[in-house]
Image (cartoon, rainbow, N blue to C red):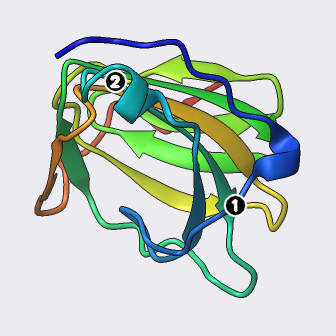
Amino acid sequence: MSTRFHVAHRADAKFARRGLRSYFEYRDLGIKRATGGKVVAHVIRARPQKAPHGEWHAHDCKLQFVYVLKGWALFEYEGVGKVMMKAGSCFYQPPGIRHREIRHSKNLELIEIVAPANFKTRALPAARKSPGRRSQG
């Protein structure tokens, strides 16, 4: 798998309603193709009148990094607790960490980078109680 130079401009941006979560729209940044499937990068934004389902899950990947561009999202991580992410916040999710999204703002927009590009998501039963009710961030 070879890699190649790639550029994506906002003027050419198209959001698709297909993706991992039905309550989001995804803008592919072309990184998956440019890296031969080593990495995927996309802009994700909230769909109007759609709410997260709050199901616990984990991703089988080597790297997952998220940067919040606009709005906010409340997540919960097993062993960590609830974490409020706001515009300007970024987070790295360790591989396989059990987590869920509880809610987000109507204007949520974020960038997500995951390696490898094709990864599996496993739905999981409710997590064991997180320590306390602390909030990160």
Q: What element carries label 1?
A: loop
Residue annotated with mark 1: 14
- Report the quarter where the N terminus lies: top left
* Disc 2 versus disc 1: nearer the observer: 1
Q: Give amino acid for label 1.
A: Lys
In the rendering, at what x and y percent does residue 126 appear?
18, 61
Q: Residues within 10 Å of mark 1 (few under 14, many from 20)?
A: few
Q: Which of marks 2 and 1 is nearer the N terminus?
A: 1
- Residue 48 visible to the viewer: yes
In the rendering, at what x and y percent does residue 8 appear?
69, 33
Closer to us: 20 or 9: 9
Q: Quadrant of residue 33?
A: top left
Q: Give amino acid for label 2.
A: Val
Q: Quadrant of residue 93?
A: top left
Identified at 57% across, 69% down, the residue is 16
Identified at 76% across, 47% down, the residue is 72
In the rendering, at what x and y percent does residue 68 appear?
72, 34
In the rendering, at what x and y percent does residue 73 appear?
66, 49
On screen, 66 above or below 52?
above
Q: Residue furthest bottom?
A: 49
Identified at 19% across, 51% down, the residue is 127
Q: Do the residues labelled 2 and 1 touch (CB within 8 Å)?
A: no
Q: Which mark is residue 39?
A: 2
- Residue 71 visible to the viewer: no
Q: What element carries label 2?
A: loop
Distance, label 2 to label 1, CA atoms, is 19 Å
On screen, 80 above or below 70?
above
Image position of 55 (left or right of 88): left
On screen, 129 above or below 68?
below
Identified at 34% across, 12% down, the residue is 3
